[in-house]
Structure formats: structure tokens, C-alpha cells
Image (spheres, grey):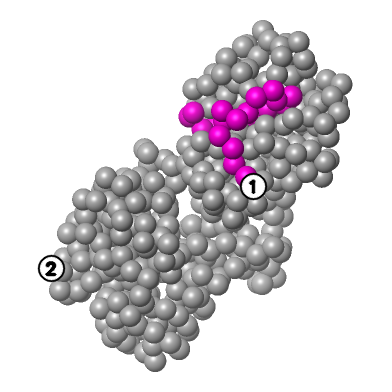
Amino acid sequence: MELVQEIIDRTKRLAVVGLGYVGLPLAHAFAKKGLDVVGFDISKRRIEALKEGKDPTEEVGDEELSKVKIDFTDDEKILKTVSFFVVSVPTPINFDHTPDLTPVISASAIIGRNLSKGSIVVYESTVYPGCTEDTCVPVLEKESGLKCGTDFKVGYSPERINPGDKVHRLANIKKVVSGMDKESLGVIKAVYDLIIEAGTHPVSNIRTAEAIKVCENSQRDVNIAFMNELAVVFDRMDIDSNEVADGMNTKWNALGFRPGLVGGHCIGVDPYYFTYQAEKLGVHSTIILGGRTVNDSMGRFVADSAVKKMVEAGLAPKNAKVAILGLTFKENCKDLRNSKVVDIIKRLGEYGIETVVTDSRAEKAEALREYNVELHDIGEIRDADCVIIAVAHREYVDLGLEGILKLFGDAGKKRILIDVKGIIPREQLEKTDLIWWRL
């Protein structure tokens, strides 16, 4: 445990590699405890913003960031001064739903080139069971010329940060930790115990920790898929799925899931990491892949439902002015990764429908760069024939029905409201002349 005391005494440095929605809060938390922290990212633009005291993720906030000292850098040679590494780079999927390990392999290569004896490398990036030891360790060894287990050690601690969530924060979420042996586990647990108020939960090996992460999100994915499938059927039965969910949730053992668009960097991705490894072992997933199929289809379902409502209203969809409120993958955050609202936009485009998209949280430049979607200010939306509330940002909830109605044209015209998350109460909608639909 000598390394732990040296980290506390600031004679050894700790680095967080990858300063996104997971890495930046980690770096901030360690620095807040007075540790000597290096924050490394390959993005020069991100490092420049952080050095200026600006938090691009809004997970920490500019004010909190200014209270701590972190050595932000994109110069990998600085990592030669580090003895404890935390890897928090993204792990996306390829077009064919196979894992894209490029970021985590690249991060391993960078660390490997600058790894010194006695160091510990902990991965937080979501991977399939076995990836840390079978894929990352060989890269570390090759680049460093060192031997894992003898010269350095590794561990895994799955991230559980929920972007945009101001209640469930890094410090108050119990942290699963693992190491390649008893000694490394003890050090890793002690380091995380410095910042995790809720405590840590050690498990016996790295593969188990990796499995915990993909299982957590696969479980949520399957449960949401169940509700989405019900919503599709209930739509044909003319039953409000939100009302059904409200009734279900009066029972003490109800799970509380609701239908919706499932995107983001975790739930919409992690199940594919699990099924990829399962297929390699000769096991075909039916439940998990079935859930993914359902959830990946929901954007198209919402778009098709909007078109049906336009036709029902006697509008020519191709000539209709359609406004979409929200582009991020979930409410009250600016994270655009794997947004399923994009599926709605693409599907409407297949009908020849051009949309006007606004988002009160997302960055315009990022939306254009990632999805070629131009974001407009909500004040630019007027005379809409159809409004799709795709993301329940607080700003849209606060608009209420009165504010939403201002986005439409004359009251005498047919007006369609597609309320994906059901933020406008049903009883209010029934008192209007709107043609409306909720998922």
C-alpha cells in the first residue's frame, strides 16, 4: 500500500486519460482531495478549454473547476511522471454493431509508451469481459517493454456516471473495483475510497467487474425494450402507454421503466459489447439482441406515427413544417452521443420532410459536426404544422402547453403535436383542438 500513501503525499502522480463526461469528474474529484493530478486528452481543443477554466461537459462546472489544480495536457510525455492511471475514454460501436476498441487501444498505447515500473493502470471504459487482460494488457506490454504482473499491474472499475444527473453523482454512487491480484485490488480500492463517499465494492477478478458493467446496462435496455414493445402494441389498441405505466407503478414491486428513445454512450451501446463476446463463444443472444432491435427501431416508429397523424389531419407531409424540440440523447444534458432523435430526422427525410431542430442544451457546432444537423433557436420556430417534443429538457417542460402552442400557426389550421415523453398532461391535450400522439 506504499503507492497509496505516496499518492496521498503527492510524491507520486495520478493521471486520468480521457476528459469527457466520465474522466473530468474523476480528475476533479481526485484533485479536490489534494492529489497531484494530470488530466490528459488527445483533443487540443478540449485541453485549451479546460486550461481556460471552461468545462465543455457541464458535469463539473466552471466554478468548481476553478477551485482545483489539475495539470491539463495533450502532451503524452507528461505521463512519464505518473504512477497511477485511470482510463476513461469512450468505447463506441461500429456500423455493424461490433465494438470499436480504437480509443481504448490508442489510450493503452499512449500509456504504454510512458509507463514506468511499479505503476497501476485502471480501466473505466466499458468493455466486454476479458478485454482488459486480453486486448489492453498486450498493448501496454508491447509499447512499454514491461511485463504485466511483474513490472506493472492493471485493474478495472466500471464507470457509473449518469450525464446530466445532479442527484446521482460520482461520490454518492457505490464503485465496483477489481484488480489482477490481491495487492493491486487493495491499492485500487484505497485510491477510489479517497473520493467515493458511498464506498467501494471489490470483486474477485477483472472479468467479473467488466461483466457487471455490461449487465447493468443490458438489463435496463431489455426492460425499456419491453415497455417500447408494449407501447407499439398499445398504439394499435388506442391505449395510452403512459397511463398504463402509471397504473403499473402503483404496485410495490413495479420496476418503473417507461417507453422512450434509447441512445447515449451506455445503454444504447453496452449490450452490443456483451453479445459480441457471447457470439465469439458460440452463444447467440436472443433476449438482449431482441431488446436492441426493438429500441433501435423506436426513432422510425415515432417518425412514422407523426406522418400518420399528418395524413390523418389532411396535411401533405412533404409540405408540412415540422419542428423538433431536442436532439441530445436524454433530457437535461448536452450529450449528443448516439442520439436516437437523429433516427427520427432521418426517417422523416425519407418522406421528403425537412425539419427545423432546436435544442436548449446541445452545442450547435457539435450537432453540425456529428450529425450534419443545424440547430435553431426556439424563437425561430413559428407557424409549425407539426411539433415533435423529442427530449424532455426542463426548458420544454416549463414551456407548458401554452408555450408549445405558440410554436404553431393559426389556431384555425390543423396542428399536430407528437409528445414522445408525455410531458404535456393528457387532460390538457384533450381540451385542445390539437391532433396529438404520445409514445
Q: Of the two numbered discs 2 and 1 on the same chain, state the one appearing first in sequence.
A: 2
Residue 347: which quarter of the image?
Answer: top right
Q: Is residue 304 left or right of residue 63?
A: right
* SS at badge 1: loop
Residue 195: which quarter of the image?
Answer: bottom left
Residue pictured at 33% horizontal, 46% vertical: 61
Residue 377 highlighted magenta (yes or no): yes
Residue 188 highlighted magenta (yes or no): no
Mark 2–mark 1 distance (CA, rounded to whole Å): 49 Å
Q: Is residue 196 visible?
A: no
**In this view, the mark in front (2 or 1):** 1
Q: Which residues are magenta?
A: 374-395
Q: Where is residue 41 drawn, in percent x and y?
A: 40, 67
Residue pictured at 67% horizontal, 32% vertical: 323
Residue 431 in the image: above or below residue 344? above
Q: Is residue 310 left or right of residue 203?
A: right
Q: Which mark is residue 9?
A: 2
Q: Is residue 38 visible?
A: yes
What residue type is disc 1 on?
Val
In the rendered image, the quadrant that contains the N terminus is bottom left
